[in-house]
Image: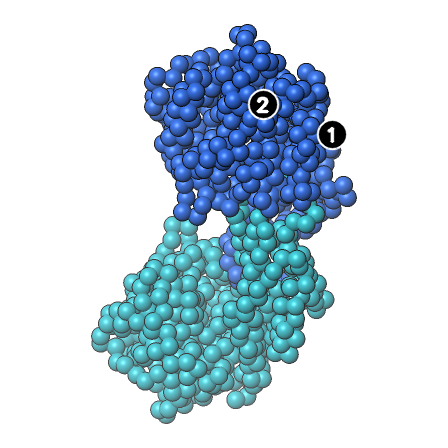
Chain colours: A cyan, B blue
Amino acid sequence: MSSQVSDIAMSVAGAIDEDRLWANLMAMAEIGARSDGGVNRQALTREDGDARALLIGWARERGYDVSVDAAANLFIQRRGREAGQPVLIGSHMDSQPAGGRFDGIYGVLAAFETLVALDAASLETRHPVEVVAWTNEEGGRFACGCTGSIAWSGLQPVEDFLGEVGADGVILADALAETLAATPDVPKRSLGGGAIAYIEPHIEQGPVLEAGGLQIAAVTSIQGLRWYRVDIAGSAGHAGTTPMQGREDAFQAALRSVQALNTLMDDPADTVRFTVGRINVEPNSPNTIPSSASFTIDFRHPDADVLADLGGRVERCVVEAAAPCGVTVTETSTMAPAMFPEPVVAQIEASAGALGFGVTRLPSGAFHDALFASKACPSGMIFIPCRGGLSHHPDEYATPFDCAAGARVLAATVAELAGAAPR
Amino acid sequence: MSSQVSDIAMSVAGAIDEDRLWANLMAMAEIGARSDGGVNRQALTREDGDARALLIGWARERGYDVSVDAAANLFIQRRGREAGQPVLIGSHMDSQPAGGRFDGIYGVLAAFETLVALDAASLETRHPVEVVAWTNEEGGRFACGCTGSIAWSGLQPVEDFLGEVGADGVILADALAETLAATPDVPKRSLGGGAIAYIEPHIEQGPVLEAGGLQIAAVTSIQGLRWYRVDIAGSAGHAGTTPMQGREDAFQAALRSVQALNTLMDDPADTVRFTVGRINVEPNSPNTIPSSASFTIDFRHPDADVLADLGGRVERCVVEAAAPCGVTVTETSTMAPAMFPEPVVAQIEASAGALGFGVTRLPSGAFHDALFASKACPSGMIFIPCRGGLSHHPDEYATPFDCAAGARVLAATVAELAGAAPR
């Protein structure tokens, strides 16, 4: 790897066709289209299958090799001069139930456009370049998100997920079998196998690029997270008759707890992410003192030491604040941060700079398939701006220019990583 | 009226039969009995009808006059030497869906036991003594609670309530007609007509009597209330990607609002009642910043001036605390406090004292039919302790001794008010 950007890389970037990429995005947005402008294309549904079929058709028109593995990860390979591990690029095609037209699918189509740009620039590469569409990143239907990339990376066998029951009652094993059966002519391949590198383009899902007037972020890391559920037990009582002194109001205890957590998580550098997104109170009646309250904590940080330190203080903080109410704190999920290798980050940054785009380095606040792929090969991500930082929402939007910019940076980066040269 | 307690009054109190009253309470608790020990006997249901039929049967066995008005308020009169307005005593027979065995029904049966005690003591009264069972106090099925007492007092015509749709989809007019049709032999009477006085025995629904080891409260007033709904508009965002600075987190805004209200409502005398019983957050997802939050305020005080002052400051307090989120504050209900006339309170207090019970004066935190009856005639209430202050709950409990104590105080008070004398 090097951080130079060759004329060849610039020529592939120049062969990216903004109009074709946008037309492909809009064609995919028809599949699972919602009346509000969004997309409902959940993993391993019929709509997911339709999107796969459309992409497979485009790939075959251009003579690329299509294959699928046991986790239904879909691969489209443009061959290199040499066989062996590819430069892997892509993202996912599934959406949230009320999702947008860019999250995930943008990365897959920018990757596909990169293959087409290599054709258009009449270049061959030393290593194969392969588009991947990972299965079930979102976790909206089957809660085990990033199923495909976790299985491909060897972190967990796909069998671990087969019993998962979807929000619609369908078993993951059945949905997976149905999806695979829908494309009987696509060759099966083994799970895994690694890659020279994995690069994932994605909308930022945050406001930083838009606010800074920038087109590109070279993503340095994916922050780690610790999720908790806090259950508080109080005592119900009549709102009119029960004196304030001596009440065990579970909502007031939750309020004191969140205040204490606000103080614990306070960070002048604004790197800590701390969110109470869900709160439920029982009996939730206007004239009854709440007998119980539960809330969630979403705590994220790019530094494993900070995650360990602050996360380790959550329980004591809440227990002290909620007294005299009793508290149970359950850690429901934990994920270590991932640091992307400097050469990959530097290559993306250099490509963006050479192409004249405004570029910065950013950690990723959300997790992505790249978090898991990074355990199996050197990985990186390219962010483009999205309007208002909005994602997981029908109004999610990225401009055609920014979509093409991300694809150009990907194409230039791939040209360097895969060893592009004239035919 | 006088605050003396005559030998005759003491003799009626002495004729109250603790075992009979308890047996009647337990017989009524069979109607709508829940497997958890509670009662589900909602207004104008078949169970309510069964309870009415049982009471009517007991009344006829003893030769009392039964009648019913257009609001299905049920009256059982023991005649006096003179016709004209009665001394009215009672409460309601309907329960919450997951209610207890004492709330409401205790007052009706203590009143009925008073009629029986007058018989047992071989006394006549100058004025009629009349038991009333008001229709739909609880408001659990038909949200317009205290329907019967409001209509009887002339505060609103019963026609105002006829279109009310129950939680089960039934129209109040239909349920009312069905209840009236079930007892075709009970004479109809006009709504209203007033009373010399109205006295309502009830469980305290609070912890004060039990904590003080007392049997009786002479209720001085029913506190007024102001209810509000607060709607806060924030901005959704990804919990992992959105910087803390600049977030418009609707739940955090709700938290700041409730903190500010806690300060506003702080009362060292512990007379203010302030409860946030319901809170709902959208989208209520662990990894999404809440875009909206709404919560209720239940604020009560016995002093109309305090209700006006503090209540008038709620909106500004919340608007300032919730910034930069937008806020709408809606006052959903308001009820002025009622002060019971001193002679009635003093008579109850004197009766309890003469009978050797521990007695105190208390405001009522909950509202009751007496709040509305008090607009039509001099009214008062007698509280007895309930275990743990618990009500509106299957575990609601009052001891046989305390139930009898409340009936004895009622009987002695009625003897004075109605002019009891040997036959």
**First in sequence: mark 2 or mark 1?**
2
- The chain carrying label 1 is B
**Figure quadrant of the C terminus of chain B:** top right
- The chain carrying label 2 is B
In the picture, the disc for residue B345 is none
Marks 2/1: CA–CA distance = 41 Å
Foreground label between 2 and 1: 2
Which residue is depicted at the point 36% across and 64% down?
Answer: A166
Numbered disc 2: secondary structure: helix
Q: Does the image show residue B397?
A: yes
- Which amino acid does the dot numbered 1 rest on? Asp
Please provide percent x and percent y for residue B83.
53, 7
B30 over A369 or under it: above or below: above
Q: Does the image show residue A361?
A: no
Which residue is depicted at the point 51% across and 69% down?
Answer: A332
Q: Quadrant of residue B338?
A: top right
Q: Name the residue that disc number 1 marks.
A: B305
Numbered disc 1: secondary structure: helix
Please provide percent x and percent y for residue A271.
65, 69
Please provide percent x and percent y for residue A225.
56, 71
Q: Neighbour class for label 1 at 10 Å: few (<14), some, many (≥20)? A: few
B367 over A43 or under it: above or below: above
